[in-house]
Amino acid sequence: MSTRLATGGRLLDKTKAVEFQFNGKRLKGYAGDTLASALLANDQMMVGRSFKYHRPRGVVASGAEEPNALFNMGQGAKFEPNQRATTTELFSGLYATSQNHWPTLEFDIGAINTLLARFLPAGFYYKMFMYPRTFWKHVYEPFVRQSAGLGKAPDAETKDADTYEHFYFFADVTVIGGGVAGLQAAKVAAKSGQKVLLIEQTSAWGGRAAVDGGEVDGQPVADWIDATIAELDAMENVTLRLRTMASGVYDHGYVLGYERVTDHQPDVTGPRHRLWRIRAGHIVTATGAIERPLSFAGNDVPGVLLAAAVRDYAVNWGVSIGDRTVVVTNNDNAYRTAITLKELGLEVPAIIDARAEGGGALADKARDMGIRVENGKAVVKVKGTKRVEGVAIGLQAGEGAVLETIKCEAVAMSGGWSPVVHLWSHCGGKLIWDEAEAHFRPDPDRAPKGDAGQAFVTCAGSASGAMGLGDVLADATSAGAKATGKRKPKAPAGDARDEAPMAPVWMMPQGAGAKLKMKMWLDPQNDVKVSDVQLAAREGYESVEHTKRYTTLGMATDQGKLSNINGLAILSDALNQPIPQTGTTTFRPPYTPISMGAIAGEARVATFQPIRRTPMQDWHEGQNPFFEPVGHWRRAYCYNRPGETHGQAVEREINQTRNSLGLLDASTLGKLIVKGPDAGKFLDMLYTNMMSTLIPGKCRYGLMCTENGFLSDDGVVARIDEDTFLCHTTTGGAERIHAHMEEWLQTEWWDWKVYVANVTEQFAQVAVVGPNARKLLEKLGGMDVSKEALGFMEWADGQIGGFDARVYRISFSGELSYEIAVPASQGAAFWNALMEAGEEFGVMPYGTEALHVMRAEKGFIMIGDETDGTVIPQDLGLNWAISKKKEDYLGKRAQERSHMADPNRWKLVGLETVDGSVLPDGAYAVADGKNENGQRNVQGRVTSTYYSPTLKKGIAMGLVHRGPDRMGEVIEFPTIGGANVKARIVDPVFYDKEGEKQNV
Amino acid sequence: MLILECPYCGVKGEETEFHGGGEAHLKRFGPGSDDDQFHDYLFSRVNPKGVHLERWRHVNGCGKWFHAARDTMTLEVFGTYSAQVFEPPQDIKDKISAKRPGWQWREFS
C-alpha cells in the first residue's frame, strides 16, 4: 500500500495539516501536497475508471502529463470536471469525486466492458454504429451519449461563481519553464538589460534537478536554484510567475499564458485564472522532457508509475507508492529511482533492465547498494487488478515465457525521455529524430519564423535534447544569449552525464503474442492498446494523423503526452518503416486544457457586448417595453400596457397609428453622408437606381447589391445639395455599408473625389406617423409642413417646436408620415415635446413589430426577411428601382448571368390563407414529387407572415416559383403539426395599393 | 497572431486591429465582360503556399485599406504598401526576389 513516509517531503509544510474530501471520505494531507500526492499518502491507489473498458486506474505521473487522475472538483456553481490531481494543489476544504463509474469507484458495472474488450477493438464505434441506419437515433445515440465522456458537464442552470481576467504583457524575452535551464536562460537574458518574463507552470522553481540533485559550480543544485531566483527577483527588468502555464505559441511571438491565481487558495479574493496575452521579442522554451511508459501487459494496473514520478512522490512529498518497487527500464536514468528508494529505506526487489548490455555507473552504484539488477529481462505481465501484486519476469528477446514472479506493490517504469516540443511546434518549428535517445527533438535550423523571417523561438535544456545537468546549463546559456542577440557568457559548470546508451524498447517482451498485446496500454486515458494500433495498420491506416483519429490514440485531455511516441513507434513497426518517416501528429495549443472562463476573461454579462443606446433610450426603458436586439441596439418590440399580451399591444399600436397618430424611434437607422464632386457618380455605382439625377430637396428609395448581384441593403437617399447626399441604411447595416463604401472608394475608385462619414449617432430621428401627423407638427409650430411646401418624398430643414429639424416626407407604413431628424442632444426633449403635444390625438409610441406589420401590409420588403444573400432585386419585383440607363453598377454584371435571368426563379408574391389564419414563418410550399433524398419537392417559402389588424386576417409574403405568373393559384404549406395550410397567391401589396394615404 | 504595420498611420499593430480582405491587385470586370472573365474576377483566387499579396484594412485604427506582401507559410512580412497602386512597389518586389529566388510578379502561385 502507498503511504506517507516519516521523513522527506521537500515541498511539504508538515506543520500545516490540510483536510479534504474524496468520494465523501475525509482525508488529511499537508500544505504543499498535490491532490495526487495526498491521495497516495492515504493509500488511494485507484483513482478512476478508464474511458472505454472501465478498468481500475491509478496515478501514473506527477505532473501535467498525467492521463488517469482526473476528478470532478468542487460543487454547485464551482463544479468543474476532469481536473488533473497531479497539478491540483491541495487546500483546506477541497472536494473531489472520481469519474466514469457507476455505481461506485470500487464496484463499477461498466467494467464488464473489459471482458468484452475482444469485441471492442479500434474503430468499433465506426463499424458498429453504421447500420442499420434507423438504429442511430433511438438505439445507438442514447447509448453512446450515456457511456461517453469522462466527467459530468456542469449543471446548465448554474453560473460560474468565479471571476477571470485578461492581462496584456510585452517582453523582449519570454522564458517558459522554471527549471534549471529556464533559470539560466532567464539569467543570461536579464543580464543584458532586456525585459524578461519567466513563467513556470508548477508552484515551485527548479524542475527535475531539484529532485534529482547534482552540483553547479561546486554547490548543490538546490542552493544554485535558490540563489538564481533571488538574483532574478531583485532585477527590475525581470518578472517571475509561478503557476503560469504557457498554453500556446502563436504567430510573430505571441504567447498565451494561463495563470492559476486562486485555485490553490479559494478564500483569497481576486480572479481565479488570469490569461496572459504576451507579445515577446524572443521566446525561450525550457519546458523539459517527459518520461515515456513501457508497453508491457498490465502496464495500466494501479501502482505502475513512471520511474521519475515514483522519485518525485518520494522526494517532493514523502510518499512511498509501496514497500517493494520493481524498476523496469531501458535507460540509466531510472536507476536513480531505485537508488532514491533504497536510500529512503524502501525495498527494490529488482531492476529489470531490457538492455542486454545493461547500464553504466548508476547501475554499478545500484548493485553496490545491494539491489538485484537483471539485464536483458522484461516484465511479461503485471499481477493484480485493482493494485499491483507482483510482476512476472521473462526475457526481453523472448515471447513472454515467465521465468520468475516477483512480489511487489509498485512498478517504476521508464522507456526513455521525450523533450516537450509542443510550444516549439505550435508555430511551425520542425523536429529531428535522435537515434541515440530515441526521441524527437527540435531542429534548431528550422525554427518558427517571425515577421522579419527571423527565428523567434529557441529551446533550452532538455527541451532541446540536452540530457545531463552540465549539458543543460551549457545549452541554456547559449539559448539565453541567442534570445538577446548578445555574446554568450561562460556557462556554469554542472555534473557531466555519465550514462550508458539507452536502447529503444517499444514492446516488452519484443516478441509478445496477441494475448499480451491486448493488455499493453499505449494511451490509458482513451484505452488504446498496442493491438489497436496494429489493427489500424492492418486495416490500411498509414498516416499517423488517420491512425490517431481511428484509434483515438492521443486524443484524450492529456493529448497523448505519454502515449504518442510509443504509439507511432508501434505504427512504424507495423508499417515496416523508420519512425521519422511516420512522423508525429500535429501539436496544437493548448499545452494543457485551460478554463473557458479564462478565455472569456471579463467579457461576460454587461461587458460581453456594448449596447448602443438611442437618445430616447431612457424614455423607452421607463415604459418597460419588450425589447428585442437589433444589431447592437435594443429596440422596443412593443410597449405593453398592463394586462396586454404582445399581440394585443401590437394591434393597439397599429390601429392607433393608422387611425390617428403613432411615434417610432427611428434613430437606429443608418445615416451616411456622401460628399464630394464625384458623389453622384459614386452613388450611381453603389445603388441600382440612378442617384445622380436626384434633385436637391428630394428623396429616392434605393437598393444596394453586392458585386455578386445579391441585394444587400436598402434605404432612402436624400440629396442635400449638389455635392452632398444623405444615405439611410437599415438599422443593422450602417457600419457594414459604410465599410462597403470605403472599400470601393479606397481600393477601386481611389481617384474619385468623395468622402463618406457615418453620422448615425449624430441625430435622433422620429417617425411621426398617421392621419394626424401634420396636425401635430403644425401644433408645435415652425416650418411649413403642408403638402404644397413639403410634398411626398421631399425633405426640408427648419424648426419644429423650437427644435432644429430636418424633416423627410417618407413613409414605411403607408400613412402620412414625417421622419424628423434633430441633433442627438435634443432627441429626448424633442420626443417628449411630441408625446406631450400629441396627447389630444391619443399619440402612442409603436415598436418594431408594429413597424414590421405595417410595412408588410404595404408590401414593402425588409432586408433579412425577404432577402437572405441569395435574392436579387428582380426576384422581389423591384425592377422599377433598377436603372436601365446606367452602363454599370455593383451587381449589374452578376445579374446578367444566365441563372439570374432564369424565369424559373422563386419570386416575391403575397400569400393569403384560404381560412384567414397566419402562415407559420419560414414554412415551405410543397410541389408534386420527391427529391433524391425522398423529401417532398418544394416550390416556395414564406419570408414574412403576420396577423394584420388592419385587414383582420393573416397576411404573408413569400418567394414562390414563377410566383407573379400564378396569381390566384392556391398552394399548400405543410406545418410542423402535420396539417396543411392552403394559401392563395396574391399581390404583395395588401393595403392602399395606390398610395393615396401617404401622399396627402 | 500577426503583427502588421499600417503604411498610412505608421502604427505597428496586432492582427486584431486589422481585417484581412483577400488577394490584392484584382482587376474588376463589369458589364461587357464574358462569363469566364467575370467568374475569375469574382471567384478565382490564388492560394499560394509562399508569397502572397493581400488586402488588409486597419479597421480598428485609421480605417484605411492597404496591401501586405507576406509569406503564407513562414508568416514573414516583406512589407506593407498603399492599396492605391496596380502592383507592388519595386523595393518590395526586390526584397521578395532576394529572399525567395525565382519569385516573379504575377507568377507567384
Image (tube, coloured by chain):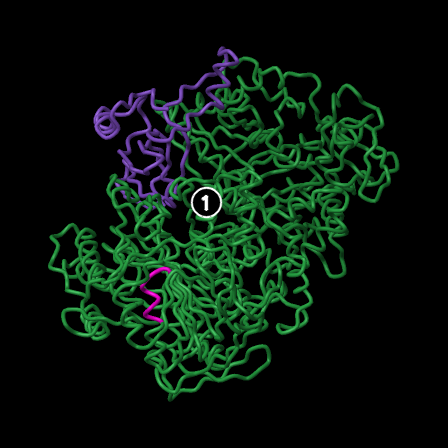
**Which is nearer the eye, A686 or B13?**
B13
Residue A331 highlighted magenta (yes or no): yes
Percent x, y for residue A653?
A: 72, 48
Percent x, y for residue A668?
A: 54, 44
Q: Residue shown at 74%/21% (left/top)?
A: A962
Element assignment for label 1: helix
Q: Which of the 4 image quadrants contains residue A915?
A: top right
The vertical placement of B83 against A551, above or below, is: above
**Kind of residue sitting beneath label 1:** Asp
Residue farthest toward the right in the current orientation of the protein:
A915
Q: What's the magenta region?
A: A330-337
Percent x, y for residue A951?
A: 81, 38
Percent x, y for residue B46?
A: 41, 25
The hue used for chain B is: purple
Left or right: where A684 falls relative to B3: right
Q: Which chain is green?
A: A
Q: Which residue is mark 1?
A: A573
The vertical placement of A705 against A431, above or below, is: above
